[in-house]
Image (cartoon, coloured by chain):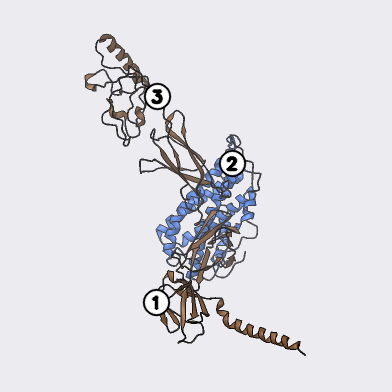
Chain colours: A blue, B brown
């Protein structure tokens, strides 16, 4: 991983790899397993809950950052220096993702985002912000566990961090205050976009995995969606 | 020797004719087009004629009064839309046409109104525009779409001339879209731009084919069905949720139901016999805004066919309420107004009617000379449906206050006969 001078994301890379193993895979009771359907539904519901929670959290945090970050038509260029996981994807590629890849991308994204959020929490100035962020992190942790559960139910392995990414954490020169705030802005924006994307990802998974017993109308995905 | 002379003569004549022709039919035959602003003043010169030339002006073939002239120039003050037309000036004596002007009176464009919407998410979105006030002259519009720094193509709509379509290349983008439009005409220029996130402009078309039907044997039910809008490309991965509103025509207050899936719903609290108006709206489950309301469906719940009057019937005087059926009509034969709550109360429990029937039988047997009551307690009738009591025409029902009949329990009521719904 490229450690750029002044790149706060790079500094956190090591921290994130350490925290990678934190989301615990819930032990699934396999007997009488209704299939992954209910847990996909639960995961979908969690993304909606988190999206709702994020709206108020982001509002508070952006106000704390102050103008121009809290202005509704603030439209900065994305410099691309950040290592945030990007939700944006080519339309056709997204439609043709297989289930495993779809779930893996979600899992990896939220693992990273959770890590960055925790770092944000540590730097937050007010106790109220820290409380809100901590609460959100806990919920996000729950979402990760839920995704892990779905993957386990479907027999997909959880993604592991690549070997060789363990780096010693050396503090670099401090980010400028403004650039740091830009990083925070993009983190929240990317998080919100990922939650919108996940809702759609899990909708797609839900439809593909209608439990056969309950389905009076069996959906055959004949057209390439 | 004689032959070349006539030829030369013809040539000279032809040349002379050509000169005369060009003099008479000057290039001013094709009118000069001129745009002027509404309310302004304009002076139209008569081509290249001298200021003191003697000319007559006509507009659309009608002579203009000489007091509008300033020498050979036509002066128009305070231009109005009616001043638009073909102005021509002629040499006064020879009626030789000097000059023509096609005058258009209009306005420069005001700031255009631009809005974009995605009713085909995730395929793409469209933008449409219009001017808040007319200019009365032709305008040209130019639309540019930027996604970050990338320029996107906006394809003109084949049918509508102020709409264009953009296809999404990428979904779930954190970068906003910026759509700019500039409008210009002969008198001026204006522009505007809007910026938005991919998710905020999602708004489906209204649901289609909304149909409401009565449910047989159910005077309080209406079955409503509809279809997802045909423009929504992928309802499987991008499911819609629906919002249904309904009210009887006679009331202003809507009832609302939000439905997270399915394209059918049964209304179970309709007022019997009242015509209803029903509409449905749609929204993506997670993002964007609600569609407009669908075309309204009308339906009236099922009502029982009235039975024929029989000769022994003494239909009691009962006022049938023609106003709202919410309040119990004042002069009915109801003893217990509890039954006529606003939405209809619960049906009389069966176990209450049994002892009452027994009591009634005993009363009748012991006091047969007294004809107090003649009520059929078998049916529930329409009493608890919130409608005015329609007495069964074949039965006479005289209702005495409860106090005179201590054997009546609190829950017994006078009711017209009729099938329990």
Residue placed at 40% from the left, 61% from the top? A126
Coordinates of residue B43 in the picture (x, y in percent): 44, 80
Which of the chains bears the disc numbered 1? B
Q: Are marks 1 and 3 in contact (CB under 8 Å)?
A: no
- What is the CA distance from the residue labelled 3 to the residue labelled 2? 46 Å
Which of the chains bears the disc numbered 2? A
Label 1 or label 2, whichever lies nearer to me, is: 1
Name the residue tied to disc 3.
B420
In the image, are marks 3 and 2 on the same chain?
no
Name the residue tied to disc 1.
B77
Q: Which mark is residue A36?
A: 2
Residue placed at 77% from the left, 90% from the top? B1
Residue B87 in sight in this render: yes
Q: Secondary structure at mark 3?
A: loop
- Quadrant of the rendered image containing residue B348: top left
Side of B14 where A120 appears, left or right? left
- What is the CA distance from the residue labelled 1 to the residue labelled 2? 80 Å
In the image, are marks 1 and 2 on the same chain?
no
Q: Nearer the viewer, residue A126 or B63?
A: B63
């Amino acid at each position: 991983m490229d450690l750029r001078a002044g790149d706060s994301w790079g500094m956190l890379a090591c921290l994130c790899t350490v925290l990678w193993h934190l989301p615990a895979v819930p032990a699934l009771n396999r007997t009488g397993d209704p299939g992954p359907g209910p847990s996909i539904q639960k995961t979908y519901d969690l993304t909606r809950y988190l999206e709702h929670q994020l709206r108020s959290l982001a509002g508070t945090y952006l106000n704390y950052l102050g103008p121009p970050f809290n202005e509704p038509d603030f439209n900065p260029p994305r410099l691309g220096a950040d290592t945030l996981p990007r939700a944006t994807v080519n339309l056709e590629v997204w439609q043709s993702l297989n289930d495993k890849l779809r779930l893996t991308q979600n899992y990896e994204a939220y693992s990273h985002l959770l890590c960055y959020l925790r770092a944000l929490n540590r730097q937050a100035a007010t106790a109220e912000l820290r409380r809100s962020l901590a609460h959100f992190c806990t919920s996000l942790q729950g979402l990760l566990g839920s995704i892990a559960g779905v993957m386990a139910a479907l027999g997909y392995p959880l993604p592991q961090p690549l070997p060789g990414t363990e780096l010693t954490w050396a503090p670099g020169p401090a980010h400028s205050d403004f650039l740091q705030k830009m990083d925070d802005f993009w983190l929240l924006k990317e998080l919100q976009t990922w939650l919108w994307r996940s809702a759609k990802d899990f909708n797609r998974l839900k439809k593909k995995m209608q439990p056969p017993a309950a389905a009076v109308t069996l959906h055959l995905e004949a057209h390439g969606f | 020797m004689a032959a070349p002379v006539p030829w030369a003569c013809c040539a000279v004549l032809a040349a002379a004719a050509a000169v005369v022709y060009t003099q008479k039919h000057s290039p001013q035959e094709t009118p000069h087009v001129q745009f002027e602003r509404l309310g302004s003043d304009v002076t139209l010169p008569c081509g290249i004629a001298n200021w003191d030339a003697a000319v007559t002006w006509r507009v659309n073939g009608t002579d203009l009064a000489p007091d509008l002239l300033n020498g050979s120039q036509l002066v128009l003050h305070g231009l109005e839309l009616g001043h638009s037309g073909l102005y021509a000036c002629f040499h006064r004596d020879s009626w030789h046409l000097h000059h023509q002007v096609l005058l258009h009176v209009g306005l420069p464009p005001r700031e255009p109104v631009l809005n974009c919407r995605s009713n085909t998410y995730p395929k793409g979105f469209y933008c449409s525009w219009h001017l808040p006030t007319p200019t009365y002259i032709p305008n040209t519009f130019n639309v540019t779409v930027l996604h970050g720094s990338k320029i996107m193509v906006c394809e003109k709509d084949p049918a509508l001339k102020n709409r264009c379509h953009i296809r999404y290349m990428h979904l779930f983008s954190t970068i906003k879209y910026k759509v700019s439009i500039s409008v210009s005409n002969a008198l001026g220029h204006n522009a505007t731009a809007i910026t938005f996130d991919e998710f905020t402009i999602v708004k489906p078309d209204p649901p289609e084919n909304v149909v409401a039907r009565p449910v047989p044997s159910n005077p309080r039910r209406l079955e409503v069905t509809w279809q997802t809008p045909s423009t929504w490309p992928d309802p499987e991965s991008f499911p819609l949720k629906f919002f249904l509103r309904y009210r009887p025509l006679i009331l202003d207050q809507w009832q609302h139901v939000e439905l997270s899936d399915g394209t059918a719903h049964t209304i179970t609290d309709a007022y019997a016999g009242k015509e209803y108006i029903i509409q449905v709206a749609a929204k993506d489950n997670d993002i964007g805004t609600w569609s407009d309301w669908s075309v309204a469906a009308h339906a009236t719940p099922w009502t029982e066919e009235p039975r024929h009057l029989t000769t022994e019937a003494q239909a009691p005087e009962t006022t049938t309420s023609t106003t709202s059926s919410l309040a119990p009509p004042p002069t009915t034969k109801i003893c217990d107004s509890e039954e006529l709550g606003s939405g209809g109360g619960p049906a009389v429990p069966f176990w209450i009617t049994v002892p009452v029937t027994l009591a009634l039988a005993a009363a009748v047997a012991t006091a047969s000379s007294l004809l107090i009551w003649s009520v059929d307690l078998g049916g529930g009738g329409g009493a608890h449906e919130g409608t005015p009591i329609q007495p069964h025409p074949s039965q006479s029902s005289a209702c005495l206050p409860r106090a005179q009949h201590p054997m009546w329990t609190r829950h017994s009521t006078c009711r017209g006969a009729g099938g329990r719904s």
